[in-house]
Image (spheres, grey):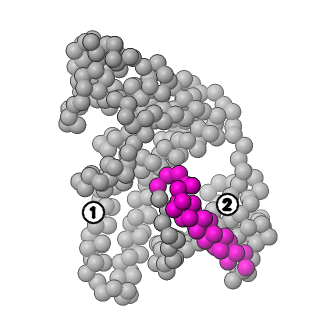
Amino acid sequence: MSCVPLQQSVADLDVAFKNFFNSCKGKRKGRKVGYPKFKKRTSSQSARFRVGGFSLKGDGVYLAKIGIVNPIWSRELPSEPSSVTVIKDCANRYFLSFVVEVEPVKSEAKNPSIGIDLGIKTFAVMSNGETAESPSYKKLDRKVRKLQRKGARQPKDSKRQNATRIRIAKLHNQIADTRKDFLHKLSTKIVNENQVIVLEDLNVSGMVKNRKLSRAISQQGWHEFRILCQAKSEKFGREFKVISRWEPTSQVCSDCGFKWGKIDLSIRSVLCLSCGTEQDRDENAARNIEKVGMGNRHDSKCTQR
Ligand SMILES: [Zn+2]
């Protein structure tokens, strides 16, 4: 074992304790941070090498005390990496993850702005009328649930249960990879085409408490999508906006500003009483999100009268 990853894990423990104590004292924003947990043999393992602990040797990577490993490169490194993390995930796959610095690229977008409404049935409805369907995770999910039941019946820490655990982890990886591929493609397309991207702030942790929908919501990866959009906006010099979750985007007509109030989730389209246009629920919401984000929304209080 090289000394570098050992020092790095002590440094990580230091960060974990600092986060925990700052969270206790109220110095840290956001959700409460718990006491650091011990690593598990069964969870994913990682080792981080800093400069001096690794070097690039042609197509291979030299890791201290391990030697040269030959990874399959997903893309070329944009600059000299400052560290590399070797990750072994639960399904025994190995990854190298490099930390590099990237310069933002300036480019022109063809559309000025877009609002996006995220949902379960259709993943995203854009304010220009486009929709994006997410891949179906149903089949894989059914297999996961079956194996989870099987694993629960098997004796704890047995060889058989371990085999089941790895099979479950592999399926989870398959779901995650499908989702990641979809989200990456969609967010790249959106960021490439639009100058300003407006999303809605969703209360995901609150929605997950709905037991009937929690699995479907978690599988969508809304938060992942938001992070990808944000990062890519930064990279391509776009503006990324998130509007408040209390904005009544599905209760207002996006054409005239008439407020019809709360409607049941089962109602998919609304005929506006004021201007007579039929509004698709999600598309209307997406256009409202764009309007609120761009700052030219209707004054709903005036038109309500
Ligand atoms: Zn209207």
> Residue 21: percent from the left, percent from the top?
56, 64
The correct choice, above or below, for 112 with respect to 175 in the image is: above
Residue for badge 2: 98
Residue under label 1, please give it: 142
For the residue labelled by badge 1, is the local secondary structure a helix, a strand or a loop?
helix
* Residue at (65, 54) in percent of width and height: 75
Residue 125 visible from this viewpoint = no
Is 263 situated above or below 122? above
Dot 1, how many residues are within 10 Å of its Cα: few (below 14), some (14-19), or many (20+)? few
Residue 176 shown in magenta: no
The N terminus is located in which quarter? bottom right
Mark 2, secondary structure of its residue: strand
Q: What residue type is labelled 1?
A: Arg
Tell us which disc is closer to us: 1 or 2. 2
Residue flagged by tag 2: what amino acid is it?
Phe
Can you name the residue that lies furthest to the front here?
A: 25
Q: What span is in magenta?
A: 3-31
State whether the magenta stretch is mostly helix, strand or loop: helix
Indicate the quadrant where residue 17 lies.
bottom right
Residue 219 screen position, x and y as percent = 37, 54
Q: What residue is drawn where x is 49% and y is 52%? A: 30
Q: In this view, does 169 lie above or below 77?
A: below
Q: Is residue 23 visible?
A: yes
Q: In what quadrant of the picture does the C terminus appear?
A: top left
Q: Distance between the residues labelled 1 and 2?
A: 35 Å
Describe residue 146's horizontal placement relative to residue 201 as left or right.
left
